[in-house]
Image (spheres, helix red, strand yellow):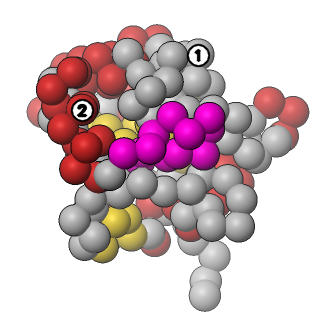
Amino acid sequence: MAQPHTIADFTATLPNGENVSLADKLGKVLLVVNTASKCGFTPQYDGLEALWQQYGAQGFEVLAFPCNQFGGQEPGSAEEIDSFCKVNFGVSFPLFAKIDVNGDATTPLYKWMKSEAPGIVGTTGIKWNFTKFLIGRDGKVVARYAPLDKPATIAKDIAKLL
């Protein structure tokens, strides 16, 4: 297989098990986030929804990928996760099926994003829930943000790309 170059080279799985191409995301600015419902950073769903509401009409999307690899903080089923996010945080942006972001079962999208934007001192592993990747309209990784980086602090970077 050819080396992936943009987000368009990947698919993602919806909670219902359907695989969708991410090629239709080209031309949009994306914030890709690994999420968890029982994490200290879970309130960031509010900030992610605020960004989606603020910039969605301008071609911005949040893509949330639940992950249970950090402290077992996302144990629920796809339906439970979806319901939790809608009821507690009013989330209206896309939630995908639960994935692995580290280890042998790492989803190809995350392997690619981690190689394109390594973390501190060049490490590629995801350290915790709510690590964020900003993807430009050309489908390429622009930046990586730590779990401590609140969504509001990323707004200026999103606005520049729009």
**109 left or right, relative to 102:** left
Q: Which span of residues is magenta-colored? A: 65-76
Task: Assign a secondary structure to mark 2.
Answer: helix
Q: Nearer the viewer, mark 2 or mark 1?
A: 2
Which residue is drawn at the image coordinates 82% and 42% (left, top)? 123
Image position of 54 with respect to 21: above or below: above
Q: Position of residue 17 (x, y in %)?
A: 28, 70
Image position of 108 with respect to 129: above or below: below
- Please state which amino acid type lies under the numbered disc 1: Leu
- Tag 1 residue: 148
Q: Position of residue 43 (x, y in %)?
A: 38, 16
Mark 2 and mark 1: span between their CA atoms?
22 Å
Task: Assign a secondary structure to mark 1.
Answer: loop
**42 left or right, relative to 125:** left
- Tag 2 residue: 84
Using the image as rendered, state which of residue 158 and residue 106 is in the foreground: 106
Dot 1: few (<14), some (14–19), or many (≥20) neighbours within 10 Å?
few
Which residue is drawn at the image coordinates 29% and 17% (left, top)? 46
- Please state which amino acid type lies under the numbered disc 2: Phe
Q: Is residue 75 magenta?
A: yes
Q: Earlier in the sequence, mark 2 or mark 1?
A: 2
**33 left or right, relative to 20:** right
| On-image quarter of the N terminus | bottom right
* Secondary structure character of the magenta stretch overall: loop
Q: Quick check: can you spot residue 156?
A: no
